[in-house]
Image (tube, rainbow, N blue to C red):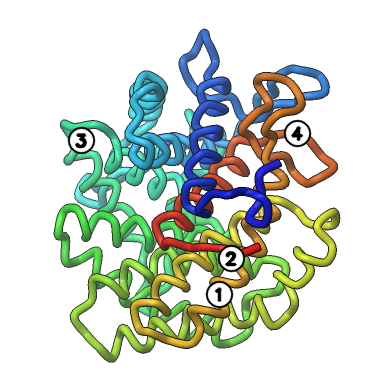
Amino acid sequence: MESFASANIKTSALLRGRVALAFNWYRGMVNAETGMLEYLYLPEAERFVRENCPIRDIASVWDAELLGEFLDRQELQPLIANSLRHFNGYLVERDPPEAGMMLDSARLGEPPSIAHSAFMVLALLHAPPPWRRREIATLAEGILRQQRPDGSYKVYFADLPDQGEELYAGEAMLTLMEVHRQLRDARCLQSAERGFSYYDGHYFGRGRVGDDVLVFFANWQSQACRLLFECTASAALQRDVALYVFGMHDRIVDRGFYRDIERHPARQVSVEVACGLEGLNDAYSIARGLNDEHAERYRRCICTGLKYLLTLQCTNIGTERERGGFGASLSERAQRIDITGHAASALMKSVENEIECGG
């Protein structure tokens, strides 16, 4: 297996090759009848498993779009078109209509949330032109209307208690920042700024994020905050955003997350490592932009995580359909669509950040 130590090749070139393998894996995950992605592949049984998980299904369309953009490849465009056509049928207006749109609970099979809307917007933003600007704007409006006066986001559109806030709020903020970045909607930027203030000072800052969900929380918050850092004109806000992001990732590093990956790779859960590296790459980007000492610390941790992911990815063994995907762990070969999406994203971010790892 290629590795940083043995391959006479730059890290970026090695990672690009592995991203291409992941792209080919996605092609093999397309259901021939529906033209949409399967959810889970079991290599040992050589069969697919379908599960009702629409958030992951919609997010995987966005993942496929990002892969195609990164590699400048078009083979997944029919999958993207079929999937967007399918999920576009889920969109319904809220009452009153000026409150925006959401996805229909009957079609979803579960209560619609800001996460469903967020990933639908991201998929639409990265779809081939012409953009569905009305759908993007009205779905974003629906998310904006979910923000409370304190800056937090109500997760469900129905009258239900919040659940999954440690993931869904960051996903919503990332989406609003993408809408602002691409469509120059100032209200989306203002909402993300208020969300940052809440989740920094009143959520993470008050110890409401447990170690069991910290890598997932830090991942989505860091992705949103990197765009906020890049888009804001306020030097004071940039400083506060950097301190927030560094605080999350320093806590992850200090509790031994990357040390354990290096010392006990067999004990790791792949989705945690992949999500950790996604967010850490955004923290690294901020640190490098500030010429901050955190950058080198984070680069070393990224290299530790990359070594694990390169070992985990199926390359030259297993079934043909298995190659390019990422299992649940080093001992569990089952390949879930979102795990490969997170892992491929971590590889792509590492290339974009020009991460180089020595032997």
Q: Are marks 2 and 1 in contact (CB under 8 Å)?
A: yes
Which is nearer the N-term, disc 2 or disc 4? Answer: 2
- The percent coordinates of residue 235 (x first, y second) are 25, 88
- The percent coordinates of residue 339 (x first, y second) are 62, 44
Q: Residue at x 47, y 43 (%)?
A: 16
Which is nearer the N-term, disc 3 or disc 2? Answer: 3
- The percent coordinates of residue 9 (x first, y second) are 53, 49
Nearest-to-viewer mark from 4 and 3 = 4
Q: Quadrant of the C terminus?
A: bottom right
Give me the C-alpha separation between circle 1 and circle 4.
30 Å
Does any portion of residue 349 appear in the rendered image? yes
Residue under label 2: 302
Q: Quadrant of the N terminus?
A: top right
Q: Residue at x 24, y 64 (%)?
A: 188
Amino acid under label 3? Arg
Q: Secondary structure at mark 1?
A: helix
Nearest-to-viewer mark from 2 and 4 = 2
Tell me the crowding category of disc 4: few under 14, some 14 to 19, or many 20 or more residues within 10 angstroms, Cα based.
some
Disc assigned to residue 334: 4
Q: Residue at x 41, y 45 (%)?
A: 119
Give me the C-alpha separation between circle 1 and circle 3.
38 Å
| Up/down of 165 relative to 136, above or below | below
Disc assigned to residue 298: 1
| Up/down of 68 relative to 8, above or below | above
Give me the C-alpha separation between circle 4 and circle 3.
35 Å
Does any portion of residue 162 appear in the rendered image? no
Which is nearer the N-term, disc 4 or disc 3? Answer: 3
